Amino acid sequence: KKTKHLTFVLLIMNILKTVVLVLAAAAGSSALQMEPSITNFEHQTWAQGARVSLEDTIEVTFVVKTCPMARAKLEEKFWAVSDPKGPDYKKYLKLEEVADLLHPIKEGKTLHADFIVDFLNNQEGLVKSTSVTKTRDLVSATLNAKVAEEFFQTELYHYKPNLESHSSLDLIRANAPYHLPDELASKVSIVDKLIRLPQIVEPKLDTSTPSLRKNKIGGDDVFNSCSSSKCSEATTPAVLQAQYGYPTLTNVSSSSSMACAEFQFQGVKDEDMTNFIDTCGVTHCEVDITEGQGGTQIAGVEAELDVEYIEAVAAPIPLTVINSISFSLFDWSQNLNNDDSPAWVQSVSYGNDEIQQTSTEYMDECNEQFMMNGARGLSVLFASGDQGVWGRTGMESDNIFHPDFPGGSPYITTVGGTQFLTKSTLGEETTWADGGGGFSNTFAIPDYQADAVAGYLASGVDLPDASQYNATGRAYPDVSALAGTANGYCVAAKGRYEKVGGTSAACPVFAGHVAILNDLLFARGESAMGFLNPWIYGVAGPAGAFNDVTTGTNNAGFGNGFTATTGWDAATGYGTPNFAAMEATIL
C-alpha cells in the first residue's frame, strides 16, 4: 500500500510540474510545445540525479525544418537513384547538391540555419558555441544548462545509467515537455539531445555450457578456431567465412570504405585488436579513422564486437568509427553531413522502440537523414534489436508487439538474427528467437517489399493474432546474419575474451559483405551499391542470393512471434549472406 501511495503521489507531482511549466510558458512570450506526443519522461535504465546548475552546459541539435516541396524532391531522387531497373540508378548526388536541394541559398533570404544561430546568440547568457553542417540542416549548440531551462521552459537534470558498466556516463536531459518561441519553432522541427535517452542494452553473453567433445561428435572443429579457451564453440572469423563464402581480401580499391557508428561512449583498444588478430588468425584489424567524440574513452564489448567482425569480413577496406557520447543519431548525421567523402557502407547497431520517447517528428527527421544518405549512394544498415517482437519495452499486459526504430524505417536496411540449427555445426541456420522483426506501427509498407510481404502473409505460415501487429506497416528485417548466443561471437575486449551474441554482431557482418561488393564494383569502374532494399527485394532476393532460413520464431522465448518460412519472412527477412550468389547479381 505504501508503494502504491508513493507512486500516486509521484504521478500527481509530475502532473502539477507539467501544469506549472505550461502556465509559465503561457505567461511569458508566446511559445510552442515541441514533440507534444511525448508524455512519458521516465528512463528505465537511467537514474535521475541533481538538477543542473549555472556551471553545467548542454549540447543540443536544432533540426531545421525542410520545405515540404524540397523534401518531396529529395525522396523522388532517393528512389530514382536506388532503383536497379530505373534510368537514374546510381546517379548519386554530391554533398553540396543535397544542400542546394533542401536548403538553397537565395539572394535576399536568410537561411533557416542562420536565423536559428542569430536568434540563439541574441539570448543573454545562453550560448557557448554554435556550428552548422555543410548541408545547412543541423545546428549544434552548446548552451548554459541553467539558462537553457528558462529558454526551453522545462527542467533539466543529470542522468546516469543504472548499469555499472556505464556508470561513468553523465548526460543532461529534460524531465518535462520543452518549448520554443514561436518565431524559432516555425523554423525548427525538433531539438535533439534534450529529451531522448535510450534503454541501454548490452550484447548478450553466451552462457551455454560447452559440449563434451573429446571425440568431436556433434560439432565442427572450426568453432574452436580462436585459440582462447574462453572461445570454445564460438562463432569466429573462420566460421563466418566457411558459412558465407566471402573472399579474403588483399588489395582493395582506393575508393572502398566502411564505417561503424558507436553510441555508448565506447571505443576500442589497440591491445584488444592485436589480441583478436593473434587469437583468431585474422591478418588485419584496426580503425583507420575516428570521428566524433568518445572514441577512446572506454574500451567496450559493443564497439569492439562491431570493429572486430566488420574487419574480419572486409579488411583491409578502410574503416571509420563514428562516435557519439550523447546517444544521438543526429551526432552521426552531423559527421556524414560535414563529410564530402563519407564511408560508403554505414553499420549502426543502435535503436529504440517506436513508442520509447520517439515522436513522429523525430522519426520523420531521421528518415530525411536516411534519404540524404541514400541519395549520396551510402548503404545504411541498422540492427533489428535483440528482444524479438517484444522490443526493449518487453511483453506487456496488452500483448501488443513493439516494433523497432530505425529498424522499421523504409529508408534503411535492417539486419535480423539467426543461429545454427545444430549447435557448433556449419550448414542450416534457424531464426534466433531474440532477433527483432515485425511491422512498423508508423510507416506503411513501401512499394519495394509489397509483393514479398503479401506473399508471406498469404503463405499459410502460423501468424500471430492480428491484434498484436500492424499488417499494413513497413516490415522488417530485410536480411539477417548469425546473432545467436548458442555459438556466441568470440570477442577480444578489455584485455579478455567473451562470447556474445546479438544483431549488433549480425549488422557489421552483413555490412562487411556489402563493402566487398562495393570493392568489386569500384574495381570495374562502377558506382557503389547505395540504398540496398530495392536490390534486395527486386533482384537478389528473387534470385536466391541469400541462404533462406525457414524455421524458428522470433518470440524471445515466450508468447507469439513471427515464424520463418520459404522466401521473405518477418523473422529473418530474405535470409543470410551467400556471397557467391550475391556477387552474381551485380556482375
Image (cartoon, rainbow, N blue to C red):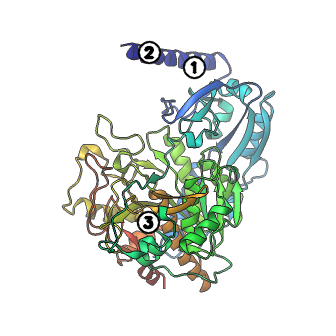
Q: Which residue is mark 2?
A: 6
* Residue reaching furthest to the left: 460
Q: Position of residue 278 (x, y in %)?
A: 60, 71
Three-letter residue code for mark 1: Val
* Local SS, label 2: helix
Q: Which residue is mark 1?
A: 22
Q: Is residue 107 above or below residue 488?
A: above
Three-letter residue code for mark 3: Ser
How far is the residue under mark 3 from the one under mark 2?
49 Å
How far is the residue under mark 3 from the one under mark 1?
59 Å
Mark 1 vs mark 2: which is more N-terminal? 2
Q: Name the side, left or right, on which 249 lies relative to 432.
A: right
Q: Is residue 315 above or below residue 68?
A: below
Q: Which residue is mark 3?
A: 232
Residue 54: name its quadrant. Answer: top right
Q: Name the side, left or right, on which 321 lies relative to 40.
A: right
